Amino acid sequence: MRVGLVSDVHGNLEALEAVLAAIPTDVPLLSLGDLVGYGPDPGAAIDALRPRLQAAVLGNHDVAAIDGYGLELFNPVAREALEWTRRALEPSHVAWLDGLAYEIRMPDYLMVHGMPVDYFRYLLDKGDAKAAFAATDAPLVFVGHTHLAEYYALRPDGVIEHGERASGGGLALEPGWRYVVNPGSVGQPRDCNPEAAYAFYDRQSSTVSWQRVPYAIATVRAKIVAAGLPAACGARLAVGR
Ligand code: ZN
């Protein structure tokens, strides 16, 4: 009983295809938001991921792409890329994004883009993790948004632990502990590892495993330039920041 966790695809089709090829087709996927924005293939990324999805939540870039909401909150590069994305998406893609929810709660986990309740807040340290645990009773919270492969754990004694998984790796979930799990970003990693990130959650064995897979970064950079998107959107892919 395994699910794949993907987040922050950001219109990077080559990275998404590498991740989809690495995940067995009978493993359903949970998407944690930001399918679009920054990258040159937002519509094709939606089309490629949709058939593999069990569930998906909205990211801040998705919301801005739907109707321009919150565009003023983005930095100039992200805003320029979002304006490009809004022109590039077909009505059917916008309609599909518009049907997604901000959160999905299952008995054993919660899916949100940034934080429980405060959906687009960045979860960056143990203080943020404490706020996240306080805002939900979900034993397991799946997030994206920061583009960092990592986890926070709330021990029964109240102490919060943190672990980074930028090079991949596993985690055995302890009974009675609670966790925030970020699979990292498929299409724009920011944890200094340029390879596409994703993760598996195995309910049966109570484990999470983080994975990385290489993809054709140079191809995506060339597409970004050819599309007239800000070159910075491509340059950062090579360094994973
Ligand atoms: Zn993102």
Image (cartoon, rainbow, N blue to C red):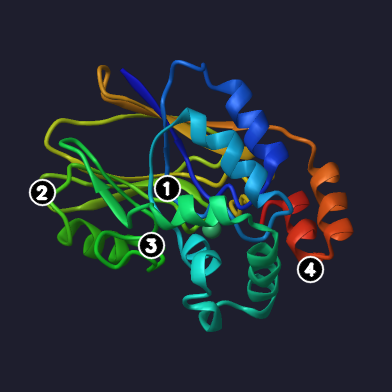
What distance separates the C-alpha of mark 3 from that of mark 1?
14 Å
Q: In this view, does 99 lie above or below 19?
A: below
Amino acid beneath label 1: Leu
- Check if mark 3's residue and mark 4's residue have beta carbons within 8 Å: no
Q: Is residue 103 left or right of residue 154?
A: right
The residue lying at 54 percent from left, 78 percent from top is 71
Disc 2: CA contacts within 10 A as few (<14), some (14-19) or many (>=20): few
* Disc 3 + disc 1, Cβ < 8 Å: no
Q: Residue 123 carries which label?
A: 3
- Marks 2 and 1, Cα distance to the nearest angstrom? 29 Å
Q: Residue 32 carries which label?
A: 1
Distance between mark 2 and mark 3 Cα atoms: 21 Å
Indicate the quadrant of ligand 1 in the picture.
bottom right
Instruction: Answer whether labels 4 and 1 touch (C-beta < 8 Å).
Output: no
Q: Which amino acid does label 2 sit on?
A: Asp
State the residue lying farthest toward the bottom. 72
Residue 69 location, x and y as percent? 47, 76
**Quadrant assignment for the C terminus:** bottom right
**Which residue shows up at 72% across the image and 38% down it?**
14
Residue 230 is labelled as: 4
Residue 11 shows up from this direction:
yes
- Is residue 167 shown to the viewer in this render? no
Residue found at the far front of this picture: 91
Q: How far apart are marks 2 and 4 (CA)?
A: 47 Å
Quadrant where the N terminus lies?
top left
In the image, which disc is placed on residue 157? 2
Query: Label 3 vs label 4: CA separation?
Result: 26 Å
**53 w.r.t. 236: above or below:** above
Q: Which label is found at residue 75?
A: none
Which residue is rendered at x = 68% and y = 46% of the image? 12
